[in-house]
Image (cartoon, coloured by chain):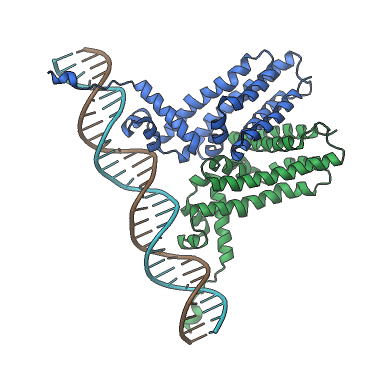
Chain colours: A blue, B green, C cyan, D brown
Amino acid sequence: MDSAQNVTRIERNPDQTRARILEAAFLEMYRNGFQGMRLDEVLKATDLTKGALYHHFPSKKALGYAVVDEVIIPTMEAMWLQPLKNATDPLAGLVTVIEQMPDNKPPEMIEYGCPLNNLSQEMSPLDEGFRQRLDYAFRVWHDVTQEALERARLQGTLRDDVDCDETATFIMAALEGCIGIAKNAQSVERLHVCNRGLIRFIESLRS
Amino acid sequence: MDSAQNVTRIERNPDQTRARILEAAFLEMYRNGFQGMRLDEVLKATDLTKGALYHHFPSKKALGYAVVDEVIIPTMEAMWLQPLKNATDPLAGLVTVIEQMPDNKPPEMIEYGCPLNNLSQEMSPLDEGFRQRLDYAFRVWHDVTQEALERARLQGTLRDDVDCDETATFIMAALEGCIGIAKNAQSVERLHVCNRGLIRFIESLRS
DNA sequence: TTGAAAGCATACTGACTGGTATGTACCATA
DNA sequence: TATGGTACATACCAGTCAGTATGCTTTCAA
């Protein structure tokens, strides 16, 4: 019996390790905020250790930044921005994204809100690195929304008096506000009520 | 020289002490959130000590609750709800409150956002005591806004197709969203842009 | 095969934090 | 004036936390 053949060799996959840490950190930040996030809780969720975490990320803050850059922003783009870019009727695209939102992850978003907005409200005044990353995200979102409105204008479906910059900002604000109101009420019904208001507003933009 | 006459007797005013702690705690919570609030920072701002603080408040959480009940909610009522209740033209009242907001405390609100919304986004998922207090505040605000819309209806100034419940919710959401967008951008100009969108929306409610 | 680097695990560390225990001073009442 | 309660100050405490130091294992390239 050759004992060397009975020793379990643990295979390493650093990319996967890193991704698991990022995912666990995202969930912890989503639930508790950045300040409330505990690295030990992140590790508990991954079954990894401090050594692994600090090998991949030099500090808690660096981990937080990576969650923004590599989890939150790409998710936002896939969920919110891509469907809008692909919409043949931009106003209908806006409405669809908003209507489908409560179905995408209703329990989680009602309970915890929007990850982008949460982090923005928590960390913008406290840390410039977070604020800049989140500001970038809001700008991208704003630009995609404004361009959608401008496409609607080219298609002749947008009222002439609509200011695309202002309206894009307003739509974003209303949407984040709706999610925030529902989160506080812990009520998907509040989200529906509010979203109906926003959808009415968007439909009112049609010429 | 009678030395007893030269000893400084410190006069105590417990109500004032309590109020100073509350005010300092409010500012600390406003800047850092509840989780980020440090009692030592609160005390540093008051020049008081742990003994005083724990005499008046049994725990950090109790202090946080008292800030909501005794600082945030009364301020909201004075700043937002009272002017609305007193407005002869309710829609104009809504517009005025929104227009005057950036002038009331522009540097602070741009930097730190809305205290009610901040706390709501941070603590609602984490603590039921906070969530209920903040939920109460949102309900009061909602009711006052809905009643204003209903008064406008009685005055014949509101479009017939407007759902007062839905619209009140939407206005609140949009307003909190505008403040949040401005806070992230650290830009009073963003707040103006967004508020103009909201004011246009409110004016569009007129029959 | 060897040695160095990468990737991970474990034990340790010091600062920080909310809260506790005790002491001192002020205030109100008899 | 004496006494007890209130209001505050100070010293202490144990647990928590992000980060550090060290060790062990796997991987890769020469």
* Image coordinates for residue B6, horizontal then vertical, percent: 49, 78
* Image coordinates for residue C25, horizontal then vertical, percent: 47, 73
- Asked whether, in this view, residue A145 is left or right of residue B124, the answer is right
- Asked whether, in this view, residue B7 is left or right of residue C9, the answer is right
Q: Where the C terminus of chain A falls, by quadrant?
A: top right
Dividing the picture into quadrants, the one containing residue A57 is: top left
Figure disc tally: 0
Res. B48 visible in picture:
no
Q: Is residue A148 above or below residue B54?
A: above
- Asked whether, in this view, residue A118 is left or right of residue B83, the answer is left
Res. B66 visible in picture:
yes
* Image coordinates for residue A140, horizontal then vertical, percent: 59, 23
* Image coordinates for residue A74, horizontal then vertical, percent: 51, 22
**Residue sitting at x 33%, y 34%:** A50
Dividing the picture into quadrants, the one containing residue B119 is: top right
**Residue sitting at x 54%, y 69%:** B12
Furthest-left residue in view?
A1
Dividing the picture into quadrants, the one containing residue B176 is: top right
Q: Is residue B97 above or below residue A133?
A: below
Q: Where the N terminus of chain A falls, by quadrant?
A: top left
**Residue sitting at x 67%, y 44%:** B139
